Image: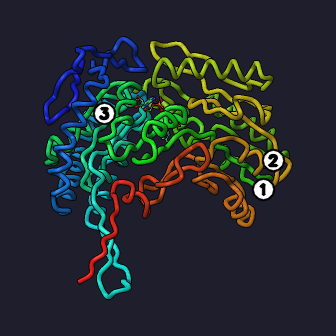
């Protein structure tokens, strides 16, 4: 069993209360992955105080140095890829292939952000009196990073990478579901030569996260998680600091009457049941044209039944367990809610035998627009079918929730695909691709309740600007 600690002021320390929590392997509940500090506001208070000192040191480091550290951290992660894949499967419940994908991606992210350190510039402007007017971009100081468990290396790397590239110190509050992988990312940065006070790791749950968001010394808070928690973070940050929130989704795939149904079924299955349905951009709704609805439902339901569910370390397993007890409860609750609301459970929707949170993926038919299983994020392997008579109705149904993260269409008709892209109220639009998955060099963020609408994450012009504050300087010679 791993004994985890917080990193505060460059020292590995327990929570000031001495309280800890344990993380179990979701595929083998007798296997304790580790024990970690249950941090509270007092721990966050110390972490931020030291991070302010770290920000002064790191903010003065040259761009070359900042880039070198991120590059070296990337190499550290790559050198340990085999071990990290094993730990990720054990801690989160991913399959080996899913874990390998994440482990390979995180160092690439860090390299991408390392290059951004060299690109921080300002602008010069015309001046009325022949003087000089220019903008100066400087780090905001201390950045708070609050993250979920479903990509415990990759999502933090998309926040900590650009924050450090810009010269900020970071107070990192990872999910209590995946504390070990969070620690590995911090170890990589320290091994890469980051000044120890430039990063703090504070384990714990909502209370620690709320303390990070509420601390006035934290100039910017980047958060990924549920819309409910994101709203609380936004309220705590207020107008004179900044928040970037990446939140929930209820992502649809529209399948038109001209679609190749084998291809459509593959796209749907990958989006719906990859990561055991626990991807923010995962597919939770299929909006099928009347002409193909029944045939597609049959294919998807049969493929869902054939899905091999088990411990992600075992050969041939296609879907791992749900990540935690609260995930299992939510899955079973929504299956019950769907049945009570009158949707038809076509297959799955029950717990499977074994000493883990294994479930049979659920496929529902007959979702009506106002049902809770149509509108609310479940974040598990529950897929619901809706019917549409044409593109207009399909667009209306696709846009018919408060979320707007990712939406897809499967069609051979480019005109329809482009029209869907134009009319979709969604930050990502996928044509003949699963709703999940994105390139790290492309701006990422949702519309409506899925994201804040100010800064995008991952890439694009607003990504680095979130981590930099700007001054306009007027000089008369
Ligand atoms: P969560 O909201 O429960 O927790 C996310 C993080 O916030 C955790 O570190 C948690 O401890 C912390 N937290 C919880 N309440 C808080 C509060 N009041 N103040 C401050 N911090 C708080 O989410 P989760 O279960 O970890 O992750 C699943 C959710 O994340 C889903 O809704 C999913 O859609 C979303 N998600 C979104 C994206 C995206 O990019 N849009 C990516 C991955 C996951």
Residue 61, quarter of the rendered image? bottom left
Mark 1 or mark 3, earlier in chain: 3
As helix, strand or loop, the secondary structure at mark 1 comes to: loop
In this view of the protein, which residue sits in the foreground, 238 or 452?
238
Residue 374, position as x, y percentages in the image: 71, 34
Per the image, the residue denoted by label 3 is: 181
Q: Is residue 43 above or below residue 475?
A: above
Tell me the residue at 32%/53% (across/down). Answer: 162
Q: Residues within 10 Å of mark 2 (few under 14, many from 20)?
A: many
From the viewer's perspective, tell me whether residue 415 is left or right of residue 176: right
As helix, strand or loop, the secondary structure at mark 2 comes to: strand
The N terminus is located in which quarter? top left
Tell me the residue at 59%/40% (across/down). Answer: 249
The C terminus is located in which quarter? bottom left
Can the viewer see residue 102 in this picture? Answer: no
Can the viewer see residue 53 in this picture? Answer: yes
Mark 2 or mark 1, earlier in chain: 1
Residue 427, position as x, y percentages in the image: 58, 53
Q: Residues within 10 Å of mark 1 (few under 14, many from 20)?
A: few
User: What distance separates the C-alpha of mark 3 from that of mark 2?
Assistant: 43 Å
Q: Is residue 189 above or below residue 27?
A: below
From the viewer's perspective, tell me whether residue 262 is left or right of residue 356: right
Residue 123, position as x, y percentages in the image: 34, 75
The dot on residue 258 is: 1
From the viewer's perspective, tell me whether residue 322 is left or right of residue 196: right
The dot on residue 289 is: 2
């Amino acid at each position: 069993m791993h004994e985890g600690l917080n990193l505060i002021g460059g020292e590995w320390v327990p929570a000031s209360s001495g309280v800890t929590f344990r993380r179990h392997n979701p595929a083998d509940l007798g296997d304790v992955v580790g024990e970690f500090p249950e941090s509270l506001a007092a721990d966050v208070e110390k972490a931020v105080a030291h991070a302010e000192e770290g920000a002064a040191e790191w903010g003065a480091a040259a761009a070359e140095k900042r880039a070198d550290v991120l590059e070296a951290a990337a190499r550290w992660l790559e050198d340990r890829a085999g071990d990290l894949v094993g730990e990720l499967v054990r801690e989160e419940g991913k399959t080996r292939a899913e874990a390998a994908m994440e482990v390979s991606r995180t160092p690439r992210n860090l390299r991408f952000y390392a290059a951004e350190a060299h690109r921080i510039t300002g602008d010069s402007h015309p001046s009325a009196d022949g003087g000089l007017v220019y903008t100066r971009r400087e780090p905001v100081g201390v950045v708070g990073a609050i993250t979920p468990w479903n990509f415990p290396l990759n999502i933090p790397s998309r926040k900590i990478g650009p924050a450090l590239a810009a010269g900020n110190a970071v107070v990192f509050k990872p999910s209590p579901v995946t504390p070990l992988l969070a620690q590995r990312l911090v170890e990589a940065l320290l091994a890469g030569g980051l000044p120890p006070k430039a990063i703090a790791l504070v384990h714990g749950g909502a209370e620690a996260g709320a303390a990070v968001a509420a601390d006035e010394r934290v100039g910017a808070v980047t958060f990924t998680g549920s819309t409910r928690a994101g709203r609380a973070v936004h309220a705590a940050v207020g107008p004179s600091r900044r928040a970037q929130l990446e939140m929930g989704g209820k992502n649809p795939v529209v399948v038109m009457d001209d679609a190749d149904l084998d291809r459509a079924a593959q796209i749907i299955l990958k989006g719906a049941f990859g990561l055991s349905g626990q991807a923010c951009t995962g597919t939770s709704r299929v909006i099928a044209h009347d002409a193909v609805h029944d045939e597609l439902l049959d294919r998807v339901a049969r493929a869902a039944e054939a899905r091999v569910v088990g411990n992600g370390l075992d050969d041939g397993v296609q879907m791992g367990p749900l990540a935690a007890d609260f995930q299992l409860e939510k899955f079973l609750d929504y299956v019950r809610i769907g049945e009570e609301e009158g949707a038809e459970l076509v297959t799955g929707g029950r717990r499977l035998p074994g000493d883990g949170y294994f479930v049979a993926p659920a496929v529902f038919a007959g979702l009506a627009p106002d049902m809770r299983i149509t509108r609310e994020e479940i974040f598990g392997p529950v897929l619901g079918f809706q019917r549409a008579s044409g593109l207009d109705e399909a667009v209306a149904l696709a846009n018919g929730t408060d979320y707007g993260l990712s939406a897809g269409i499967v069609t051979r008709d480019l005109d329809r695909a482009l029209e869907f892209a134009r009319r979709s109220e969604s930050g990502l639009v996928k044509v003949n691709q699963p709703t999940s998955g994105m390139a790290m060099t492309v701006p990422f963020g949702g519309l409506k309740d899925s994201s804040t609408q100010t800064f995008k994450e991952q890439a694009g012009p607003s990504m680095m600007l979130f981590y930099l504050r700007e001054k306009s300087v007027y000089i008369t010679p």
